[in-house]
Image (tube, rainbow, N blue to C red):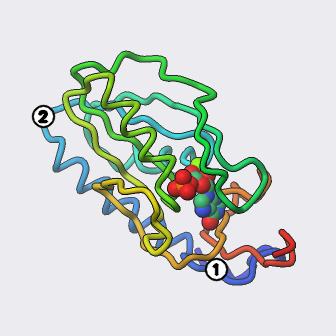
Amino acid sequence: MTDTLAHPDIEQVLISSDAVQARVDELGALITGAYAGRAPILIGVLKGAVVFMTDLVRAIHLPVELDFMAVSSYGNSTETSGIVRITKDLDATIEGRDVLLVEDIVDSGMTLKYLRQYLERRDPASLRICTLLDKQVVRKADVTVEYTGFQIPDRFVVGYGLDYAERYRNLPYIGILKKSVYGG
Ligand code: IMP
Ligand code: MG
């Protein structure tokens, strides 16, 4: 499927839905190989990671469990506030489990740095991070990410789960949002 009819608020389709799906399949294969013989628990960070996670789990051929956390750090702005607050904690116990944290995007890295420390304190057998997108150039916090879908430039993107003010999560591609939409 091509994305010729991009949403009018999208300046440019950065990653087509075909390219996203192909990369998700690759990540699924990598994770399937890395965790062979084990039953990892995937923790999705609500809400941005939901679309990615639902595709990713279907590309992982292992007995997996799913759990979710919600954090708030951005409000409705396009700039990070630097403050991370957990608004929904885990349902499951992760002590002794192989945990794979699934995120939509690493920007400053502050959210993931905080979550990595928070989860480490619960004594998982292992903890790795899988992110669909990485804006490595703007990294402020030092955080290790084991699986990355795409490195992207420092532009505000939406689609495939990523939002601006809760909108655009349902676009099937990753697109650069027009600055006029957020008054930038
Ligand atoms: P960090 O703590 O700065 O790494 O922020 C990560 C979070 O900021 C992500 O989980 C997203 O919710 C949000 N975010 C960062 N960049 C973007 C973007 O380009 N589009 C949409 N959300 C973003
Ligand atoms: Mg997020």
The residue drawn where x is 41% and y is 46% is 113
From the viewer's side, name the closer residue of 172 and 127: 127
Q: Earlier in the sequence, mark 1 or mark 2?
A: 1
Q: Ligand 1 closer than 8 Å to the CB at disc 2?
A: no
* Disc number placed over residue 13 in the picture, else none: 1
In this orientation, does residue 160 appear? no
In this orientation, does residue 67 appear? yes
Please provide percent x and percent y for residue 1: 58, 74
Q: Which residue is mark 2?
A: 37
The residue drawn where x is 40% and y is 65% is 149
Please provide percent x and percent y for residue 8: 84, 77
From the viewer's side, name the closer residue of 133 and 19: 133
- Answer above or below: position of 117 versus 167: above
Residue 141 found in image quarter: bottom left
Three-letter amino acid code at disc 2? Gly
> 10 Å neighbourhood of mark 2: few (<14), some, or many (≥20)?
few
From the viewer's side, name the closer residue of 62 and 125: 125
- Give the distance between the C-alpha atoms of the residues marked 1 and 2, in whole angstroms: 38 Å
Relative side of 175 to 122, left or right: right
- Answer above or below: position of 162 versus 111: below
Please provide percent x and percent y for residue 183: 87, 73
- Answer above or below: position of 56 versus 118: below
Three-letter amino acid code at disc 1? Val
The residue drawn where x is 78% and y is 78% is 178
